[in-house]
Image: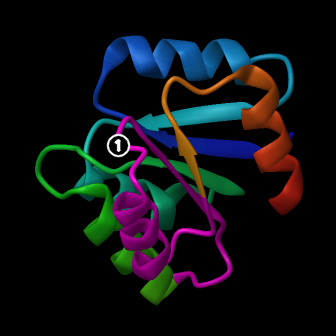
Amino acid sequence: MKTILIAEDNDSNYMLMTYILKNHYAFTRARNGQEAVEKAESEKPDLIFMDLKMPVLDGLEATRQIKERMPALPIIALTANAFDTDREAALQAGCDDFLSKPVSGQKCLEAIAKYI
């Protein structure tokens, strides 16, 4: 089974993602950007959902660091900030795709299917 790393500091957002993914994928969690970088290296997930606003290290910088080491690893930005500037910043940092919260289960699964 493919594994998805969910980089999300908010418990309710994380629970929504696990509900969407539970019948389709294995998943693991990072509660901040630094933990996301560490888990990406140690656990080798098939895809990452990256919240952009997190403590310790934000999602943009975490994405940059992960993409330096693992450029082929798909990262989908997942954020409440749905402005065009946020989308552009996420894509410039190296995110492969962008979803705004609250995300629907269907859109989430469709985005994953594009990459794994």
| Residue 28 versus residue 112 in the image, above or below | above
Q: Residue at x 88, y 49 (%)?
A: 113
Kind of residue at badge 1: Asn
Q: Is residue 3 left or right of residue 37?
A: right
Task: Answer whether residue 28 is magenta in the image.
Answer: no
Q: Position of residue 36 (x, y in %)?
A: 37, 53
Q: Point out the stretch of residues depicted in magenta.
A: 70-97
What is the residue that sits farthest to the front in this orientation? 84
Q: Is residue 3 left or right of residue 82?
A: right
Q: Residue at x 36, y 59 (%)?
A: 86
Q: Is residue 35 left or right of residue 1?
A: left
Badge count: 1
Q: Residue at x 27, y 70 (%)?
A: 61
Q: Is residue 37 left or right of residue 71?
A: left
Image quadrant containing the C terminus: bottom right
Q: Which residue is mark 1?
A: 81
| Residue 29 versus residue 72 in the image, above or below | above
Q: Secondary structure at mark 1?
A: loop
* Residue 16: quadrant of the picture: top right
Which residue occupies the foreground of this view, 111 or 100?
A: 100
Q: Position of residue 109 (x, y in %)?
A: 81, 35
- Crowding at dot 1, Cα within 10 Å, few <14 / some 14-19 / many 20+, comes out as some
Task: Answer whether residue 80 is magenta in the image.
Answer: yes
Inspect this view and state whether residue 28 appears: yes
| Residue 7 versus residue 25 in the image, above or below | below
Q: Position of residue 65 (x, y in %)?
A: 35, 78
Image quadrant containing the N terminus: top right
* Residue 57: quadrant of the picture: bottom left
Inspect this view and state whether residue 116 appears: no
Q: Position of residue 27 (x, y in %)?
A: 63, 33
